[in-house]
Each structure stands twice: as C-alpha cells, then as structure tokens.
Image (spheres, rainbow, N blue to C red):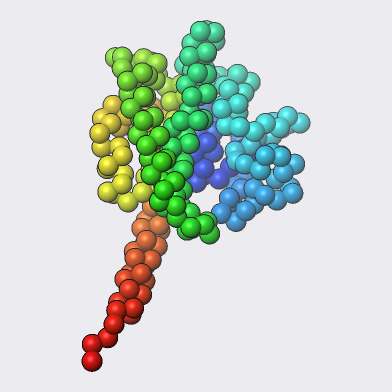
Amino acid sequence: MKLKVYADRMSQPSRAVIIFCKVNGIDFDEIKVDVSKRQHLSAEFKEINPMEKVPAIVDGRFKLFESHAILIYIACAFPGVPDHWYPADVSRRAKIQSVLDWHHSNLRQGAALFVFNTVLAPALGFPLNPQAASQAEKLLSSSLSKIESIWLKGNGRFLLGGFQPSIADLSLVCEIMQLEVLDEKDHSRILGPHKKVQQWIEDTRNATRPHFDEVHTILYKAKTKLAVQRSVRANSETESSIKKLPSKM
C-alpha cells in the first residue's frame, strides 16, 4: 500500500516530511489536515495520531507521528534514499540525532512561539501576546547564534560540516522558513545578523529544488494575506483612536 502522509503545509514539520518524500522519489498520498479548521482535533484523525498534531503517517498497518521519527523511518524503510540524509555510520547518526533533540526545545520553541504571538494568533482566533513574543525572540536569536557557532563553523555547507544535507538540515531550515510570514522589519532584524544561517537556508533550498519552493508556496501566499490583515487591523485601530479624540467646538 502507498504511504499516506497526513499534513498541513502551514506546519513546519509537515513541510519537512513532504519535501523529503518528494526529493527522494517516495510514492505517497498527501492527505491535508487543515489545522486552521481544527481538523487535527477530529475523532478520525485522533485514530491516526492521538496527540492531535501534524504530521503523521500511515504505512500499511503502521502508524507514526512526530516529524523526526517519521523522517528517520522513511530514510531507513524506503530503498533508494541516499545515505547522507541519515547515514548508516552510527556516530554520524548520533550527531544528527543530537541536533534534532536540541531543536525541539530551542529553535522550534523560539521560532514557533515568536511567529504565533507576533503574526498567526489573530488568524487562529487568539490574541497577540507581546510579552511571550519578546521572550520567544530571545530564545530564537540565541538558537540562530548557536547554529552558526556550533554546527556551521566548518567549511561544509550544511550542519555538522557536511557537504550534503541531512534530515536535520531539512527540519531546522523548514522551521526557520516560518519567519517568512513576518513583516519585513521583524524578518530583517532577526535573520539579518546571521549571514551563515542565510547561506545555509539557500544551500538547503538549492539541494532540494524544485520541491522546496513548491511546498513553501503556501507560506508565501500566507505572508501576503497576513500583511493585508495587519494593514486592515492597523487602519481600524487608527480610526478608532481618532473617534475617541475630543471634538473641538
């Protein structure tokens, strides 16, 4: 039976799994789970992933959730996936795993919470939280600095000094790509100081084209839509402030 990938392309981990499958010629069915419509909370999807999050996969009778576990499974279970994605060498695997483990509580936490509390919250029916965004930005900036000083310090183009991407590169770059929905000022302030990270993102994009750009199209469209919403909200707030001003007789 064909692999089934349950995903929402607005989800960073979902994009990593989809890109990985496409780049490696994996035959799969992509089944959209629209998080904005709360489809991940349905009883049907809970049978696939009781944690109610995307992505998740079904391979025959086998079900699996958590994107890193999914990437590892596909890299090992499907023939023809090049070794550089998840090497057979145990020490290299362990190094990749260490990056993935670090990612969960550092880069992902900082980036996801900053984007949510700066941009995405209103679109999902939640209020913005400037204090949470400020704390998240500190963790995000620290994480980007650590990536440059620890894993991109060598001559290689990818993490851990590699000259070809691993599943860690794909996972982390897809996370950082979520920053595309920010306004230009915030985007430049956060990524501007990190030239090595910017080059690494471009190298990962080039290594996975055309699938990288195609899968991220939804993000570019969301950026435009969110910018319009911010403009409308700002104009509404301005008009409201003007109405509250005392009238001159």
Q: Considering only vertical position in the picture, is 128 above or below 176?
A: below
Q: Is residue 206 visible?
A: no
Q: Where in the figure is residue 26, as x and y percent of width and height?
A: 57, 29
Q: Residue furthest bottom?
A: 249
Q: Residue at x 54, y 8 (%)?
A: 90
| Position of residue 13 measured from the top left corner of the image (x, y, whole percent) | 52, 36
Residue reaching furthest left? 249
Say if 12 sits above or below 33 in the image: above
- Quarter-of-image position of residue 17: top right
Q: Position of 18 compared to 225: left or right?
A: right
x and y percent of residue 178 in the render?
A: 42, 42
Where, quadrant-wise, is the N terminus in this rendering?
Answer: top right
Whether residue 139 is visible? yes
- In this rendered view, identify the residue nearer to me: 123 or 214: 123
For the C terminus, the image quarter is: bottom left
Nearest the viewer among 158 and 248 is 248
Q: Residue at x 26, y 30 (%)?
A: 195
Residue at horizontal 26 percent and vertical 37 percent from the top: 192
Q: Which residue is located at x 32 percent, y 20 percent?
A: 149
**x%, y% of residue 130?**
40, 51
Q: Is residue 197 left or right of residue 75?
A: left
Q: Give the tally of numbered discs.
A: 0
